[in-house]
Image: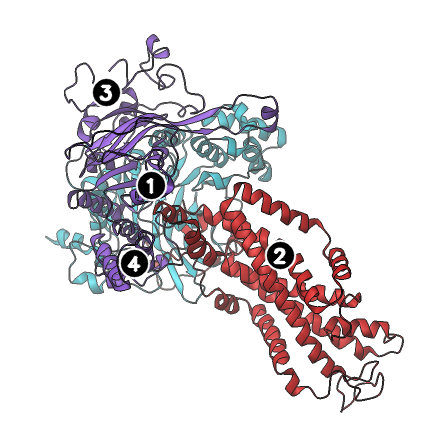
Chain colours: A cyan, B purple, C red
Amino acid sequence: MSLLECRDLHVWFDQTHGGQVHAVNGASFGLDAGQRFGLVGESGCGKTTTILALMGLLPPTASVAGEVRINGTDILCGGEESVRPFRWRDIAMVFQGAMNAFNPMKTVAWQIAEPMVYHGVADRAEARSRASELLELVGIPAAAGKRYPHEFSGGMRQRAAIAMALACEPKILLADEPTTALDVMVQAQVLELLTRLSDELGLALILVTHDLPVVAQTCERAAVMYGGEIVEDGPVADLYHAASHPYTRLLFAATPDLYGEERITTIPGGPPRLDSVIAGCPFRPRCDVPMERCDGEHPTLSITGPDHRAACHRNELQGAK
Amino acid sequence: MSTPHAAPSAAESLLEVEGLAARYPVRRGLTQVLARQTRRWVHAVDGVSLSLARGEMVALVGESGCGKTTTVQTISGMVTPSSGSIQLDGAEIVGLSERRLRPLRRRMQMIYQDPYESLDPRFRVSQTLVEPMLIHGIGGSRSDRARLAAEALERAGLAPAGAFLDRYPHELSGGQRQRVAIAAALVLGPDLLLADEPVSMLDVSVRAGVLALLDALRRDPGMGILMITHDLSTAAHFADRIAVMYLGRIVEQGPAQTVVRAPRHPYTRALLSVVPDRDPRKAGTPQILTGEAPDPANVPSGCRFRTRCPVAEAQCTTADPHLRFPSDATDPAHEVACHLA
Amino acid sequence: MSVQISKASPSAEVVGPHRSGFLRTALREHKAAVAGLAVIVFFVVLSVIGPYISPYSATAQTCAVYAPPSAQHWLGCDDGGIDMLSELIQGGRVSLLVGFAATLISMVIGGGFGILSGYFGGWVDTSLMRITDYLLVIPDLVLAMVIAEVWGASLLHVIMVIGILEWTSTARIIRAEAMSIRERVYIKRTRGLGAGNARIIGRHILPQVGPLLVANTVLTVAVAIYLETALAFLGLEDPGVTTWGTILNNAFQRTAISSGAWWAIVPDGFVIAAVIVGCFLLGQAIEDTLNPRLKVAHLSVRRWRLRPLIGRGEDAI
């Protein structure tokens, strides 16, 4: 039994003008303590929606199906009421854009202490001393907790957001684009912090990002999402060296490398519209090696190697050979 | 401020920036004003010199707050420099009146970071493209302008132009919007493009396309491109030269491959070491500098990098190093501002 | 960087804040706006065709003093034996004229002050906003009474007084909007192209604040009509002119209440309230449409639904 298990997760959004968008289509993955898992893909592929669904943090226009289990307990089955006890205590999140995660009128330490009091894990005094500990843990001097969010730099704010997520000692930390707005050096600092936390505290980490090198260097395993589906998942080294889905391969080819000699390429076209059912392979229009089958038949995830799955008809072709 | 005298030869550079400085006053509270505390300045750009030839792409890299955006804004005339000179084709532009500057603006065009914000949401693509022509009185008639707009759009890679001219920005993807913004710059036939993080807001899958477009533009009409980026990998791939900025100064500059493969400044080395590799098996040893760059209102004495430098020595606290060729330079175009290089 | 919420709505194409057609959107999304617009249109049409459908003269005596409502006189008659319905129609013409004309004045002044102040900032902003502040803190009604007294009671004066008093809030709102638009990248880009202030204001800022100005104007019409009524009720209007306000004033002065002639007061009060509510409904709806942020704050209200998976269970890996 994994610490976190997400099985066949679906999310739909109602649209204002009628109709629905199938934002997440059957995502399944599992995660154990101390593991770091990357969720990558272009914008609009469903990464953020997936982790918001794990937290039960979806707007009223959303409907959800599937199972999300933490230590075997299905947390979504009872709607908001069944998620609430788990949220922040077992599964916490670092939101994209750390500035918006803070109330500008309260000190940083106060805001880190607040969820502890709210969830009843500590009283005021205890929470305050723990907030100081957490700040030290993420590399901010405890005294700085008396300051207000706007007095923090971008990197410090991101660290403080991580400290806030850790307030109730969660087992699972979800990080949505935690380094996107940061400089390379600060990015390196934050990634090092996240890695250290997962190593030392046994925190399971889901890192959502469009930045493949970040995932390659931080996570052990990753899933590539496209059009609301996971199209490939496996160990990051396999994704890079032996990609089983053309999208993964093309994404890596589009990512410049510091010392690489080869030309970086684009993936023509854009992501598919998710407001109608896609008959064939969703990646078919942008694929560089399409086949006839891809037009009418929707590929499903199949095993292509140890701990490695991909949803591409080509793999079955090669398997048959 | 020196005035230009002799016209430079054609082989000389398109853009020549010399000792450029720009500063902002630090806001003082009322009590400080009453106490007659002296006005303090943030030296956002503090003595930047760089040159750019036609057909060349130079990448300006560095952390946020290092002054790269201010440098570009100063060159484009949106920020007034406190000292230094900027020459476009040998003609000084610092100190020109807005009226005299206007024809020069046509020759330098800026590309902005956020394609979702840089187009008027109420303007169709055709209106966005025609507007610069109306401002500068280009194209005799409405049909002339329409033709020029269509041409620019196709050069920017949105072909057939007819499919895009009548659309609104919200009907376009990020990459397409950025191409429209580039086309709106192209209609003026500029010599110099100033691109501020042109792809950082775009999806990975379309970045290469926009960068390849910039690459093509510097080759074909031979534009000079000054690109701000924080992504060293992009700089290494597309730029001819890289200039690394730290706290308002260029600390190292040279041919892109030389800077990336044989960095001489400890700051450049640290920056390069923390760029994650897309290959999970090639894990480097990141040399993570602690903290962030100091406040530009409070620049350290001596070498401005010494407070975070892993190899700083006693001399670094007193003497301010200037850009020079390293003693054992292999590439004559490679300059470093470090006592120890 | 995009806001959380926009990331969570994964439609294939990015839909930006597109403001043209705001009126249509407001009417489609807010039923109250349709009601508001219907009320306004009804009274405007009534005013335009009023002279042709008015059953009696609005100035001549056609029945007994304070005659109660009857088949001939639906809303009864006033103290001078004038048909109330005809008088209401005539009064509406004038009241609406005052409302719209005064609003036009306040729109021009307020819009102009707001745009110039927000766009230029600096000393322009400081001086224009200082003037605005002075007018803002003076109680409207008191100042209106003073001016009406000094200038003398006339319809034109009332229009000008209301117009001059009501632009301050418009100026404040438009200024804030202009300030935020000024900082947009596309304005910087246009300036970088070499565009002058006139072009930037005329082509980029004005069209963008336009819808907000309209929303505000609709709200101002309500305030203007209200203020007109109040001035007239206080007897500060030309007594020779029939407006909804002077009807109320007349009825009040000429003991309509003690005579039990409710029909001289209630219908008039009702139409005033109806127009004001109509303007508010429409104005609010337009404002809501223009400010989607009000709709977005739903992360705290987590009412997402669960839905069973039909025939998909065995596919799950």
Drawn side of residue C7 relative to residue C223, left or right: left
In which chain is the residue bearing label 1?
A: B
Q: Residue at x 15, y 46 (%)?
A: B220
Disc 1 residue type (three-letter): Leu
Is label 3 or label 1 in front?
Answer: 1
Q: Residue at x 54, y 59 (%)?
A: C213
Q: Position of residue C37 (x, y in %)?
A: 58, 72
Res B264 label: 3
Res B101 label: 1
Q: Disc 3 on helix, strand or loop?
A: loop
Residue lying farthest to the top in this orientation: B314
Disc 4 residue type (three-letter): Pro
Is label 4 or label 1 in front?
Answer: 1
Drawn side of residue B271 relative to residue C187, left or right: left
Image quadrant where residue B208 sits = top left
Q: Residue at x 55, y 31 (%)?
A: A109
Q: Is residue C183 above or below residue B310?
A: below
Disc 3 residue type (three-letter): Arg
Q: Which residue is mark 2?
A: C167
Q: Which residue is mark 4?
A: A272
In which chain is the residue bearing label 4?
A: A
Report the Cα–Cα distance between label 2 and label 1. Answer: 39 Å
Which one is earlier in the sequence, the residue at label 3 or at label 1?
1
Image quadrant where residue A191 sits = top left
